[in-house]
Image (cartoon, helix red, strand yellow):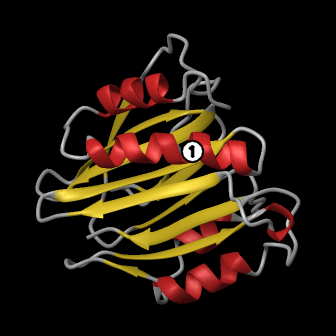
Amino acid sequence: MWQSDFDTEVYVFQRAKHLQRHCGDQFFIKEDASGFLCAIVDGLGSGKEAEEAAKAVVEIIDANSSSKSLADIIARSNEAVAGLRGAAIAIWRADWIKQKLIYCGIGNIRFYLVGTDDQLVYPISSTGFLSGRRQKIRTQEFAYKPGSTFLMHSDGLTLAGIKKYLYASGAVENTGHCIESNVADVPEDDVTFLVGRMK
């Protein structure tokens, strides 16, 4: 469990392909009194080079985490992987006061959220990946309801029946364990997922 100094709980799971030492998936979480910033970065392929690309992006996110512009963070991240393997990214910021969430994604990382009308929100990321080449960066904005659940995962996780996890009323940790049971003991790809409940 990831626990902030505030109120948000997030269950974090990560397992490397074939249980290797290097994991091409990386994640970033930061919360303060005004909101919550969260990202998963999936370096292309697996192993050390994929990990290097993903870590380069996470370093940019960390250094620019106070920026209100996700598009700016993505643009800087894109520059950071020039000459590296490249990476998929999904990043979002929740504003606790406005109860709004801004999302930006490039590649095949999935994000799900229960919205204000109890409908499943599933923003579609742009195709492609961070590579150093010019990218079309598109952000999307959603309202959310305090107490609703979110799930974010790399493409190493195959999960059917998403709604049963998002609408579960139990503890976040229990939901995390249920999702974890879908992951192979020795996975064929790097696997990362984050499941949590909005403040």
**Residue at the farthest top position:** 134
User: Would you place residue 71 above or below residue 180 in this image?
Assistant: above
Taking 139 as reference, is 20 left or right?
right
x%, y% of residue 76?
37, 27
Q: Is residue 167 left or right of residue 177?
A: left
Tell me what residue is drawn at x 75 percent, y 62 percent: 159
149 w.r.t. 119: above or below: below
SS for dot 1: helix
Residue 109 seen in render? no
Q: Position of residue 192 (x, y in %)?
A: 63, 62
Q: Is residue 156 above or below residue 59?
A: below
Is residue 196 shown left or right of residue 12?
left
Q: Position of residue 23 (x, y in %)?
A: 68, 58
Q: Residue at x 59, y 22 (%)?
A: 131
Which amino acid type corresponds to the residue marked 1 in the rendered image? Ala
Instruction: Bin the neighbour count of mark 1 within 10 Å (Cα to Cα): few under 14, some 14-19, many 20 and up.
Output: many
Snapshot quadrant of residue 160: bottom right
Q: Give coordinates of residue 29: x percent, y percent.
A: 37, 61
